[in-house]
Structures are given as C-alpha cells and as structure tokens.
Image (cartoon, coloured by chain):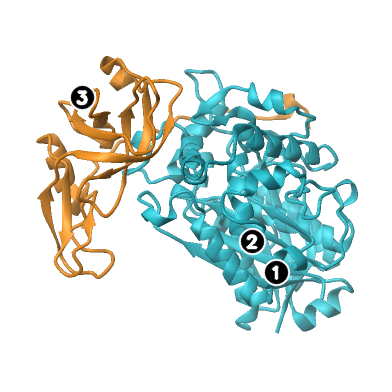
Amino acid sequence: MSVADIFEVEIEDIYRYRLSYGGQSAYFHGLQNKILTASRCTGCGFVWVPLRPICSKCYEPAEAFALSGKGEVLTSVLLPQVPQHLEHVGMPFATALVRPDGADTCIKAFVAAGPDGLPKGTRVQAKYLPEIRTIADFYFVPESLG
Amino acid sequence: MKVGIVGVGLIPWRVRYADKTYSELALDVTKAALADARLSPSDVDHVVWGLSDLMVAWVRQCCPSTTMQDYIGMAGKSSVHVSAGAVTGAMSVRQGMVEILSGMSDVTLVVGSGKGMDLWDPQQNKRSSAFLKAIMLDLDTNWEVPVEPLAAANFGFAVQAHIDRYGAPTEEQMAKVSVKNHGNALTNPLAQSGMKLSVDEVMNSRRIAGPIKMFDCCLYSEGAAALILASEDRAREICDDPIWIEGAGASNLRSYMPDFDQLGRLACQQQSAQRAYAMAGVTDPLKQLDFIETHDLLSGVELMSYAELGLCEPGQGGRLIDEGFTERSGPMPVNPSGGMMGCGHVAGCSGISRVGEIVQQLRGRAGGTQVPINKGRAIFSAIGGPGISQSCTIVLGKS
C-alpha cells in the first residue's frame, strides 16, 4: 500500500472532569490551608501520607492529623526544565521522593534544588501555591534555602 | 501437565504502521502463529488478548478485544483481555498457561497488538509528543502524573535510588547497556533501531532527567505478536519441538509510595523471578539458563535487573556489563534480541514478542541473533507499571 492509498483524518476528543478526590479530599483541604495532612491507623498505628481514611494494611479507620510540613529527600531526579507554574521560584527543580517527618510512607513531589543539586537526605520544607488543584500545587524547598 | 508453545507469529517493529490498523496487525501475527504451528483457526479453543489499557488513548477503543476477536477469525470462541501496563505481554502468556492448566482449553492463542502513533499533537506538529503524553496515563494520575513531567522520570527514580543506595552504576556503565542492545538489534531483522553506537555517543545524547539520556531509554513502537499454547499431549501431537513454559511468577507491589527498604531495588521483579524459578526448579540461574530477555525500559533498569534475576549482588550490575558478562558472546547474554532499546517496545504485545524470540532461540531458529543453547532454558522477565511496581517472569525450556 502506498502512502497515497492511506485514508487519514484528524479527530479531536476532549474529556473534561470535575474530579473528586473522594475520601482523600481532606489531604487537599489541608494543602489549601497550607497544612500537610496525614492519617494514623487506629489499629496498627501506621501513618499514611497522602492520608487514607481506611488503613490498607489492617482495614481499621485512620484518623487525620497535621504534620509539620518538613521532611527528608529519599531520592530525586533533576528536571531539565523548571515546571512552568514554578518558574517564579527562580530555582532549578527536581521531582523527588520525600519522606515527611512523622510519616511511614513517602510522597512524590516537586522539590527546588540548591547549587549542589538535591542530594539524598536533604532536609526540606513544604511551600504552597495559592490555589490547590493537584499535588503539583505544593512543593518543597531545602530548609537551608527556605 | 505441562504447557507448550507450538507456534510463534512475529512481525517487524516499526515507529508506525500507517498502512495497518491494530486489528490488521493482530490478524497478521495470528495467521503467522497458526502457520508456524500448522493449525487452522478451528483448532483454537480460547484467545488471551494482551492489549494495553492505553488503547483507550491510543486508538479511542475501550474494549478492543471484543472488536478484534472477529477480525482475526476467532468469533465464537471464549476470550479474555489482560492489561498490566508494560507487563501485559508476560501476564498474557501466564494467563494462557493458566487457561490450559485449568483444563478449560487445549489450545490457546495469546495475541496482542499495540498502536500509539495515530495520536497527533497539532501544537508541535508531531505524533511523538502526543504519544509520550498518553503513556503518562500508565502512572498514577492523582499521585504521580502531576509531579512527573516525563515517563522516563518515573523509571529514573528507581535508577537514581539504586545509585544513591549502592553507589553504582555509573553513567558510563549504563551507556554500555545501550551500546550492547542497539548493537544486538543490528542482526535482528525484526528490530526497529539497530545501531552501532559508542559509549560517548550515548553519553552525549540529550539529557532527559537526572542520569537518564535519550539513548538510555527504550523505544516506542507499533507492532504485534502471537503465540500458540497447547496442553502437553496436544503440543506433542502438533510438533516435535514444543518449547515448554516451565515456570511463571508475578508480583504487584505498592506503586507511588514504595516501602523504604525497597528503594533502589526492583523488589517486584525479585519476587516474580523467585516464584518462576521455584516453579521451574531453577536454583542457580547462572548455571541453569542459557540467556535472558528482560525489560530494558532504561539502561540502568537492565543493570538493576541483573541482581533481581540472580546474576549478581545488588549494585554489581555495572561490573557485569564492564566485564562483558551479558554481551551476546558473554557467559550470560541479556537481551540478545536487542531488547526494548534496539528491537522495539509497546506496552501490550512486546512481552509476547520477547517470549516468541526466546522460543525461536531455544528452537535454534533465531538467525542472526542466535546464542549457543547448551542448557536448554531461558527466561523473560517483564517489569513496569506505576513506580515499576509490577513484574512477571516466565521460564521457558526445551525438555
């Protein structure tokens, strides 16, 4: 079959969402109020971030509580381009696994990198954008630069 | 009872098959697999479809297996659709094995096709950017995608965490994997991107994220693959040289928030390999396997897999590539086909294709990619999914 024989058309499908975060909505309400929120299982004591209303390990209820917003970088990948909505910060950025203080889990987040990059173990502090829509709307900066 | 593979249908990997729909690609490989087994469609009891859930974005089709079943001449037979990200193909083979071991079928067709380059990005006047955006849907859309601008960054996490934990591999060692796999693909007529690369060329290719550069990444392709699986008695009737599925293991771990002790490891792959090895009676892979095909999503991921598959201790993968241990001419060839970097990859059928390549190797029909077969056994190990949290390993053997 030659290229000329191929019948090709341009089609556009657009889906829009009013997305519910369901039982994890409290996490985003917390971010909107500049608070990183966890949940502690009433059965086994495991601390979930992002919060889960029911513990996935023992199925007991987990109660929400506020964290300090501080944490530690477990590993990171420096990005070749700063995400557009974070350009105002004026620093290079990585996407990183961060263990919030007090959590038994880690989260993925944007983290501003210092002059030496973003080594494992870097202490970081959460910062929040005025409008929270997704987890990209809060980020961490090294405590030393914060 | 054992399950044998008696037919293989493979077609070349391409960037795009503009002249074929995904159903036509599936038909081509189904016909080829049936011809290889000297069977007709009426001999097939059941169809396992290995189709990525990304088909929704790629070709605007949510239940592709139901529309494709008739097109490949299998209307009226039972079928099941398996979807597990990049692990789809391996899980489809495992499901085909389960179908036969359950006694529900004697002959099962395992078939998949993948077609993502119909996507179009009018802003950039390109297909690739639209495709790369779509594959992000394989990650967790609430807890990963917003903070991971690139799929390579998702897999780059695992590599960087491995470097943080073990101090290796170096970027040069990762580059050697790319050189090896692109080089292996040069003699594979099915390969999309056989190239004679130098370490410097890989090192100087465009940096994607962290330690990852363009030539460290696997390809995105269009393609299809099919296998005919049969029960032990039926397999012996069909051909003289069935290749047996000796073991299959799978694992699915926590994805976007990995356990701390698993950082820098591919724990799901270790689990899937151990389960497959246990089923097959493999206690020392270095002594019992002829070669390995594994998912080289990134060059660093292949090096991490060496430990998870039992070739070395964690952190020692770079040493193996330095020593030439996994070259096609080495003691344990890894990805002699060219892998996903040199040969091709699309979530869905690439795992079926890799198993097909192994069958051809064990039969001694692999042509330019043939490796010496002394032990009569090889494995395929697939990894993928959000956070590289899912794996399936298949052990294949001649006896």
Picture coordinates of residue B345, whole percent (x, y): 64, 43
* Amino acid type, mark 2: Gly
Label ID, residue B347: none
The answer to which quarter of the image holds residue B283 is bottom right
What residue is rendered at 75% in x and 49% in y? B326
Residue B187 versus residue B349 in the image, above or below: above
Residue A97 versus residue B358 in the image, above or below: above
| Chain at numbered mark 1 | B
The answer to which quarter of the image holds residue B19 is top right
| Chain at numbered mark 2 | B
Q: Nearer the viewer, residue B22 or A135?
A: A135
Callouts 3 and 1 on one subunit: no
Can you identify the residue that label 2 sits on?
Answer: B310
The chain coloured cyan in the image:
B
Can you identify the residue that label 3 sits on?
Answer: A146
Query: With B189 as the anchor, is B303 left or right in this view?
Result: left
* Discs 1, 2 touching: Cβ within 8 Å: yes
Picture coordinates of residue B98, whole percent (x, y): 60, 75
Callouts 1 and 2 on one subunit: yes
Q: CA distance from mark 2 to mark 3?
A: 44 Å
What residue is rendered at 38% in x and 46% in y? B140
Q: Residues within 10 Å of mark 2 (few under 14, many from 20)?
A: some
> Looking at the image, is mark 1 or mark 2 earlier in the sequence?
1
